[in-house]
Amino acid sequence: MEEDEWSLTLQRIIFSLLLFIRVSVAQDISSTDVPVQQIRAVNTYSIDFQDLPPLIPMNNLPNTNVTVTYGCKEPSVAGVELSAIITNTGQKLMLFDKTWLCLPLEHIVQSLKINLKVNEKSLKELKMLLSSQQRTTSNSGAAQSSNTFGLTSLTVPAVVRAWIISRELYSLSENHQGAWNMASTRTSYQIKISLPMSMLTEENEQTKNVSRKLCHSWKKVLQDEISKSQPLCVQEEDDVIQILTYPVLMRASAHGVSRTFTPFKNKELRQEQLSSPRFTAVIYLYVMQYNCSTSKFGSLVQQRTWDGQFLTPIILIQEEGKIHVQVHKKNNQSVALVTPLTIPKNKWCRLVLVFDQYYWNLTATCRSKIGTWEKVFFTEYTYTPEQKFRYSDTAGTFDFGGTDAIPSFKGILGHVTWYRRTAVPSSKIPYLPDTDPAFQLGWEIDHHKARCEGHNSRYFLLLLAYMTKLKHIDKKRSCPAVPLVTKPYTSPTCSQYSQPGLLSNHERALLTSMILTGRKSRQYVGLVLYEEALSILELSFSNAPHAVTLLEQASCYGNHAASFTLSAIYTYGVGVNASKYEALYHLGQGVLAGHRLCLLAMGNKHMNGLTHVPYDLELAYTYYKHISDITKDDKESYSHEDVYTEPIRLNDDFEVSETTEEDGDIFLWLKYQASQGDLWAMRRLGLLRYWGSHGVTRNLTEAVMYYRMAAKAGDPIALFDYGLLQLKGLGIKKNISQALQNLNKSAEMNHGDAWNALGWYYLNFEDNLNESARCFEKAYSLGSVSAGHNLGYLHHTGQFPGKGADKYTAYQYYEWAADQGHLDSGVMVATFYHKGFPGLDRNPYQAAIWAQFLGEKSNAVGRLLRRALRAYKDEDRHIALLYYLLAAYTGIEAANFNFAWLAEDHPEYVKKYIAEECIWKHYNLSTQRPVNAVDPVAFNKMGDYFWYGIKEARNTTAAALMYGKAAARDPHGLFNLAAVVAEGVEVPQQVWGELQVPPSIQQDKLALQSELYSRCAEYDSAEAYIPCQLALVKVTLQNTAERVLSFLGF
């Protein structure tokens, strides 16, 4: 027994030593490039690649690294392999494989950087196989960039795979393939590798000796002479473009994904595309609805110029489901053809469109079950030489989905691949694996469709109970009253009503609510279920499983606020197991319904590459543009439920205290001041009531009352506000003559917005462009933001007197107004950056940033933030945490900050109920904005994160960058940066440039500290003054001591 205990103790010591070594190694290999948001709790096995390049150059493999993120709950074996695919045989040749031991590290995801170095034996075998393929295949279909004399590179398809299994299962597997087959946690990606063409044309020494004796052509001799003096330059070309690799949700609207192709660098390839156009498009789609109600078509693909002219190709779905293909011919005419059969709904289908000079064909196959595809139709058409179509994939922008010209279909656009210069038969193109996210989403749709059918049957049972109850009530009311019975009464009497026994408790409560309100629609039932689920979540996160049941039922009834909440719960793992596909399904349901918060959340995922969703600015713009358009329309309409979006951070005591309610001290004080004739209080109350800001409910009637009071006192601002409401008929009966009187009075006092309102009147009511432009220019000179937008509109549409349409001038006005916060101008700036035009290049980042900024102004966001702030002020931290979590899921900067702030105060509670790491992830996300839009506290927090190595290896350079950003606006950042300098850490040059530190002291450690501490002490902050001043005194004394010692010769 003692020997067994000693053996067990020895095993534990060895395991602890291995774990210690593994931790050390993990810290050494952890890359600082791994984003903080990827740190999350590991409940089971996990493995995936981070930022895997789509193309790996074979000649650079020794320097090619890929990063693998993985995690395990027990000691396990992980593996990575790279295999080339020989296209003519389908054979896979393994080029690289590696296995290693995974040991659990505090239940967090680990990362490992792997060098893909291929051995010589594998390279030789690959060369033999490809050489054989070259001899048997006349056209490999790969993009080859040639110099003046010949081909130089070849692109080969490949697959990279990763897996993780227990050590017991690994010992049973014979090789990597066996481990892959046995692993339940695995992932694979289709990529490409490029090889130098010299690999296929190398000859052995004997062949070379023979070739030297042969007579070479003049071309060969010239090539040899040139290559002696200067190596030939090889430039890789993009031939096969993976346009979409992740499902995109389309909702039959004017929104889609835009892509542009880079022109070939090689002149011959560019000429080939124009003279002998060939291409192949592979499109996966899941159609729910062929078109929207306002169009006969649902768009799949459009290529258009910057000014909206259609190019080749145009691919649409007609209202009955047939595919419409349109091309632009050489004679500047267009021709369109329609398929005889239709694309089925609610199935994954693949369209392969092949164009080859005078001929094209379209093949449609649909997925009947896992791994099985059936052909739906095949259509082909041949042109005469005179009808040859015109095609250039760089002449315009490709729009996948909807545009302002033709809206999209409703459904999902999966993978889209474009072969730029080859006509590849459909039979030669392999199908996507069943593990692809698009198919996983399709499976979730089918699964939840069956579940919703069950919920629908419960609804009909509830409806039956409702009708039965109403019938009972009516019958009871109609029963005859018999006050005096002289003989037995034999007429039917009212039987006692009893509720059906099959109803659950919450269904019985629902039935009561339906009876009391008289409302029985599915939407009403969904709303009641959603509100009940929220009330359960507001009690505790431990109630999440019960709340999820109600939310799923509410989602089935069309309540997509429930869909949004479910997606957030499954993403974070709030009281339930996290599930990326459950989260994606519920978020997708909301996006397809146009739910505002769902659109924001999906845009946020693509904007930051969160939770297995790829970073893609074009996709982020797609969703952000949609919500920004909705927000713009919302602001132009009126609802008493509207809430002004105010992103207030919880560390800002002043802003938190400024929020009030109708019974709050500030609001009551303003009412008192207004009653005493205070003009500022009147205007302030009118503003609060008009916008519904600072915690006050929106009420246009009261806003009009306060504006009227201030206008009577002759206040120019109130005269404008009151006149504008009269002009538009908001909160008051429309009165144009009275409105013009008030606006003219305000304009006479040089109020810029009043001049703008007059210009708007002349433009929309009198169609007087000259007077309208005059008023707008006067208003603009007085600083009116709206006037800047209106001048942009006149130049954009060509209505400015004496001038034609001028997009660039319009853009300059729009950008100026957008910078001042004008929503409509922001929408136009985002659109201009998205499309581009002569004089302004396309800029997907700026387009996404502007669309995001506008979408986050949505009233739906305002309501979430208000509920969270109200709970915080009421000292209900749990409810505040809940609503800030939901708001942070949409990507709001202040919500990310506040959620991390609260989670940091309650780490044990958060860790107990939320599976995903919250604190550092959300501090990090809050810093992913322009520097001036980020709270310096967040930069300081992330500086601490990197400086102390809280969740990953210490990174002093990243810490210095974060402290530097904080130092621009915060004394704490200056103090921290000075401490970094004192430690002898080299601070990146860009930090000193941004802080405008003189170059003369940048290499002097003591002088730098003195400069930073001096700036810190000069801040108007009592909290910072004493520590900064003491640190400055210490540095000054140290500097003096060094000088004295130096003078004395020490």
Image (tube, helix red, strand yellow):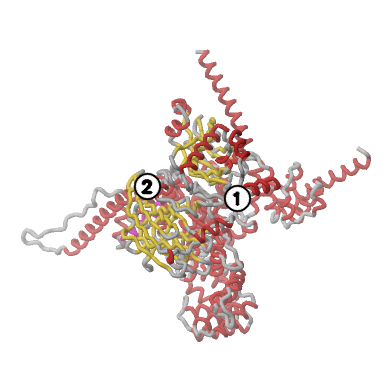
Q: Dominant secondary structure of the magenta stretch?
A: helix
Magenta range is 521-533
The CA distance from mark 1 to mark 2 is 51 Å
Q: Earlier in the sequence, mark 1 or mark 2?
A: 1
Residue lying at 57% horizontally and 48% vertically, measured from the top left: 151
Image quarter where the C terminus lies is: top right
- As rendered, which of 451 and 885 lies closer to the eye? 451
In the rendered image, which quarter is residue 31 located in?
top right
Residue 528 screen position, x and y as percent: 36, 56
Task: Label 1, secondary structure: give it.
Answer: loop
719 above or below 924?
A: below
Q: Amino acid at mark 2?
A: Trp
Question: Mark 1 or mark 2, which is nearer to you?
Answer: 1
| Residue holding disc 1 | 149
Q: Is residue 613 left or right of residue 1013?
A: left
* 763 in magenta: no
Task: Label 2, secondary structure: give it.
Answer: helix
In the rendered image, which quarter is residue 341 located in?
bottom left
Residue 697 screen position, x and y as percent: 49, 66
Residue 390 screen position, x and y as percent: 47, 64
| Residue holding disc 2 | 443
